[in-house]
Amino acid sequence: MRRASTLVGRGEMGFRGRVLLASVVLLAGCTTGQPATPDGPGATSASAAGCGSRVETGSLPDWADAGFSGDAHPPHVLGAGGDIVAVLFGHPLAHTRRDGSSNKILWVARPATPSSGALSPDPLAITATLDGTDTTVSREVAGGPGPSIIDLPRAGCWRLELRWAGHTDTIDLVYA
């Protein structure tokens, strides 16, 4: 090892050193801990296993950015129907959090049109199903989309069916 670090320090990395370095770089790229997701505009679809909505770190949709200022780019997931955004203040979400933080999610719904009459403070009803199982739990956010702490009973990929004020959408969230 001492000889290799000396050679690297002089800029004389041999064949084995280059192979080792390439292996480390490739391995690091494969261990992000995030589900694989497709790239491209509007890509919110699931991983190869069929679960895990894409966590975005760019700008929020214009209709969801009220209250955020400057260059705020919080991790967020857009609902499959495009009617709700989950802003993940507890990213990455986790089944068990040892650091004292919580799985805080700010739910921002696309504004209702005045003619829809959907301005009542109905709760946001969440039915979460663990991917590949029949494990289902219900959660509710009083007053409709807004701040919440959503803890789920097991690690894994959860498909959330969301219902509020006459609207529905789905989001897949991974809990480590």
Image: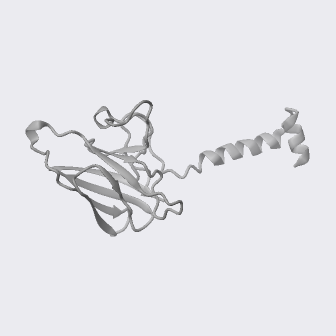
Q: Nearer the viewer, residue 38 or 62?
A: 62
Give the residue drawn at x 31%, y 67%.
136
Q: Position of residue 58 (x, y in %)?
A: 43, 35
Q: Position of residue 49 (x, y in %)?
A: 43, 55
Q: Is residue 165 left or right of residue 131?
A: left
Whether 137 is drawn above or below 173: the answer is below
Res 92 seen here: yes
Give the residue drawn at x 39%, y 53%.
104
Q: How many marks?
A: 0
Give the residue drawn at x 31%, y 61%.
128
Q: Position of residue 122 (x, y in %)?
A: 17, 54
- Name the quadrant containing residue 173: bottom left
Whether 95 is drawn above or below 72: the answer is below
Q: Nearer the viewer, residue 163 or 19?
A: 163
Give the residue drawn at x 59%, y 48%.
30
Which coloring applies here?
Answer: one colour
Give the farthest residue toward the top: 70
Q: Is residue 160 left or right of residue 92?
A: left
Q: Is residue 94 left or right of residue 129?
A: right
- Name the quadrant containing residue 156: bottom left
Q: Is residue 26 left or right of residue 79?
A: right
Res 50 seen here: no
Q: Position of residue 151 (x, y in %)?
A: 38, 62
